[in-house]
Amino acid sequence: MSADLFSSIDRELALAHQQKTFKYETPLSGPTGGHARVLGRDMVMLAANNYLGLANHPKLVEASIEATKRFGYGLASVRFLCGTQDLHLELERRLAGFLGAEDAILFSSCWAANEGVFNALLANDFGASAGSYKDAIYSDRLNHASIIDGIRLCRQIHKGCDLRAYRHLDLQHLEELLAADDGAGYRFRIVVTDGVFSMEGDIVPLDRLYAIARRHGALVMVDDSHATGPVGPTGRGTPELFGLHGQIDILTGTLGKALGGAAGGYIAGKKNLVDFLRQKGRPYTFSNSLPPAIVGATIAAIDLIEKDPGIVECSRKNTAFFRHGIEAAGFTTLEGSHPIVPVMLGEAAVAQDFAKALLEENVYVKGLWYPVVPQGEARLRCQISAAHTQQELEHAIRAFTKVGRQLGVLAR
Ligand SMILES: Cc1ncc(COP(=O)(O)O)c(C=O)c1O
């Protein structure tokens, strides 16, 4: 009965409040950047995936207004009806060029891209008789929820699709699983990984993963949502960092982080893969096309990154400055070089209290806790941006130190 459903919901929400695992939304009253207007005050923003500081860059704002004026507000259509403009094709070409791929295809989000891709590629008989083939997906256990759900959806429809989940970044485990399946008669095998894992900020050793996959005849899919922009010498992501630029079979990513931070996703790869996804990708076929404002601004974002390597460098310098400062203050972080800097606090309640106290000090950051991260590993995930000034980062480090002492995380 619906009445029971709603009282169950009430109990569940009350429990989340009691256990301090409720996810609060603290609204911003303006754009996001190195700082943002929150609760009537200016706060240093450490919670955005705005790695290159483009989310409110004047060139992107201008490009989005220009695109809206020229191409309108919305298309009122999916791509294949009347939702494709020259602008969409231009962005797909530019993304492919930036990523060294033959072609690229836009989605309404990277979630949609990841959710639809397995289904499109594997739940397809390609002319073989039903039940005569099996496929296998090898997936890092900490892959993003959209990959997990995409695989689940595919396996609902394609009963012959096996899932092998390997321990996080444990490439020996991956190779054991692949080797155990060699000669098992699989039709297609895909190894799928995040390029950068969002909870930890750790980077997949893609060169090793790629070599292992190839040794066993498997394809490689990388979700580079947190890497396109801040990772690699010129921001082209984990393939560039590991000498595999343009070589990943299926490369997915978002426009909702470093590439401007609005919304949208893409898949880049071989031309025939992209052509096929335009036919068979259900979130592509049955969901609206991206608005011109986003498409135009993303082209401007790619222009900026291609022309000015200083942007990527600035994100790197700011990250090193913050990491060094927060560690010198006595906090434990997870090692790494990515602008995701997780400050480890232990229990969810500590992370919640810490984040609340930081708001009082005009620092905006969010906590993560179980089940998003393992029990006892609650943290504040700080995300550094090229938009941060040194003063903003210094203020954040001072505020962390003050609250850390108040809450007994740091010695007084
Ligand atoms: C690794 C990863 N993949 C995919 C997504 C989803 O991206 P989008 O916001 O474009 O749906 C995210 C967003 O949090 C992500 O972190």
Image (cartoon, rainbow, N blue to C red):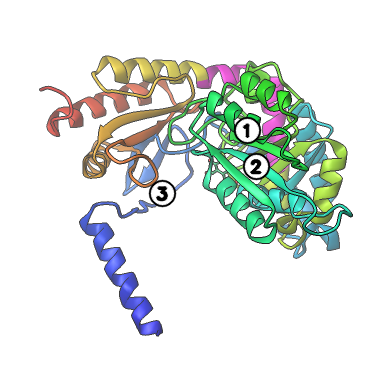
Q: Give the distance between the C-alpha atoms of the residues marked 2 and 3, in whole angstroms.
A: 40 Å
Q: Does label 3 point to a residue whose CB lies under 8 Å from ligand 1? A: no
Q: Give the range drawn in magenta.
A: 296-315
Q: Give the distance between the C-alpha atoms of the residues marked 3 and 1, in whole angstroms.
A: 51 Å
Of circles 2 and 3, the one toward us is: 2
- Position of 388 compared to 163: left or right? left
Residue 28 tag number? 3
Amino acid on which disc 1 is placed:
Ala
- Position of 168 compared to 378: left or right? right
22, above or below 10, in the image: above
Q: Name the residue under label 1.
A: 180
Disc 2 is placed on an element classified as strand
Who's the residue at 33% across and 35% down the image?
380
Amino acid on which disc 2 is placed:
Ile
Amino acid on which disc 3 is placed:
Leu
Compare marks 2 and 3 and give the one earlier in the sequence.
3
Of circles 3 and 1, the one toward us is: 1
46, above or below 394, in the image: below
Q: Where is residue 102 in the image (x, y as percent from the top left)?
A: 84, 32
Q: Mark 2 points at which residue?
A: 137
Q: How many labels does the image show?
A: 3
Of circles 1 and 2, the one toward us is: 1
Q: Which of 294 and 246 is in front in this view?
A: 246
